[in-house]
Image: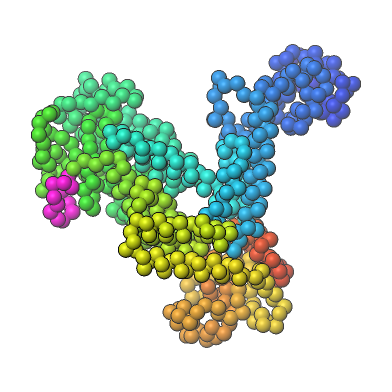
Amino acid sequence: MAAAAVDSAMEVVPALVEEAAPEAAGLSCLVNLPGEVLEYILCSGSLTAADIGRVSSTCRRLRELCQGSGKVWKEQFRVRWPSLMKHYSPTDYVNWLEEYKVRQKAGLEARKIVASFSKRFFSEHVPCNGFSDIENLEGPEIFFEDELVCILNMEGRKALTWKYYAKKILYYLRQQKILNNLKAFLQQPDDYESYLEGAVYIDQYCNPLSDISLKDIQAQIDSIVELVCKTLRGINSRHPSLAFKAGESSMIMEIELQSQVLDAMNHVLYDQLKFKGNRMDYYNALNLYMHQVLIRRTGIPISMSLLYLTIARQLGVPLEPVNFPSHFLLRWCQGAEGATLDIFDYIYIDAFGKGKQLTVKECEYLIGQHVTAALYGVVNVKKVLQRMVGNLLSLGKREGIDQSYQLLRDSLDLYLAMYPDQVQLLLLQARLYFHLGIWPEKSFCLVLKVLDILQHIQTLDPGQHGAVGYLVQHTLEHIERKKEEVGVEVKLRSHEKHRDVCYSIGLIMKHKRYGYNCVIYGWDPTCMMGHEWIRNMNVHSLPHGHHQPFYNVLVEDGSCRYAAQENLEYNVEPQEISHPDVGRYFSEFTGTHYIPNAELEIRYPEDLESVYETVQNIYSAKKENVE
């Protein structure tokens, strides 16, 4: 009977929503139902927020059930934005109707800003002050971020430009938050030794779009600790570490008991879980990110050491980090408590080498050189993080394919957050901004980011006057050029000087010589590069030399190239091009070609029609032949 009453009432709701008046058929039947049944109907998911608003205006009974802090609006909020529910405590009083309105408004603001980015920043990287609109937004930042995530998760191959700029904005917002957290962390006293927390901040900053948290990483480490305890119980069922509770920081002083813990750790980490040093792919940034170390079960000496150190300390073994040259180590004290110790009173542990225990001589043999006693000393959290970021910085300098130099930019930000007066790194940052063309929106502004950096360098080290002067000169020249720039250059295929251009923007092509797949995002009637580039690329050896159309292409390996027409051909099996800048130029992938976004279409207004003709001729003919 109860089920039948609910089904009958559910049929009344649409009519009530349509008429929104007390006279609606069945209203008296509906409002006489028990409150729990009415709540169930209103929370069933068949009604939208607008429907709930109209229902609540029909009578006092329904208005009371649809009050802002009640279950009905909570369910509306949960269904619409499920990922936000983790930010609310079950014990908090929340006006869900007001939260719904604020979140809705934040979503509209987010979409408005994302839509504006393509028009504002199509011709250059998003500048240093390009995010000022976002910083001045009202309302909770988590609502704005949630809308950006919703855009990124839009299904299909459409809205590529929206996704491109939503990703950039979300990247910036999260990095700013993480950097502020890191700076606060670095203000902790020297005896604050949460090495894992600092390493997670570095991981989060370099991977701001990934769901990385200290809580989750600690939970994974806790599960390893449980396995170690299980093994340790087989070695010594009365071992004091087995009585430790989560969060305790007790230390075991007996060397034999500490040794039992390390033996159990080595068995679990290296024999059971198969953790190992990554010798085959040593120079991979993933080796430095703690969440990746746990997923891939491999890393380099410093990341493996931090994992080993964290587990050992949780089980009462007071290992310490050693900033050993070329190979990060841990040290384990063998001397009596309170005695005067030297480097020979320690055993050194190589977590990269399956927990092998080394003497001083063996440490020197490991790196092939003699080192001073000072290099066997313990280092604090800041020094450990400095070495981690220094490794990332070295890898960033090695980048060849990623032309945005994202890893180099991220590692520079992190290093300068810890050591803001490093002159050489400030110079490198200034050069990087200049190379990438990352300028403020109004580039003649006196607060130009590059000039700020250069002024700071000049104050720190007047001896850098020559390098600073060079960069200042070129920065000011850039400003003058920006002032003189006229409107957008429009290229018409129908123009006589473009008669030799065969291909159009958006077409998926294949390079005849190198075999890579790519998509065209620009073209010139002849090669527009300088004489030096033409000479270095051996363009004169081509049958048509530089007097032929050249195409700007996004390549599947993430690079951007400038290819001669005679070296390109149609890709008979077109596929999506996995390039980070695809969304900057295109709004959709159709399966055979890309559709230019509004900004690119303004620059090549006649290309889209040519693309349609090409697709019809090339791919439709192929389909007919197959059939």
Q: Give the quarter of the image for residue 596.
A: bottom right
The x, y position of residue 328, in whole percent, is 24, 47
Is residue 241 found inside the magenta-colored segment of the image?
no
Q: Can residue 274 be seen in this view?
A: no
In this rendering, the answer to whether 167 lies above or below 183 is: below
In this rendering, the answer to whether 328 lies above or below 429 is: above
- Please give the name of the residue rendered at 46% of the width and 60% of the height, measured from the top-left corner: 451
Q: Nearer the viewer, residue 225 or 493?
A: 493
Q: Give the quarter of the image for residue 380.
A: top left
In magenta, the rendered stretch is 362-376
In this rendering, the answer to whether 554 lies above or below 11 is: below
Left or right of 367 on screen, residue 540:
right
The x, y position of residue 193, in whole percent, is 30, 35
Left or right of 535 on screen, residue 570:
right
Q: Nearer the viewer, residue 480 or 46?
A: 480
Q: Nearer the viewer, residue 431 or 326?
A: 431
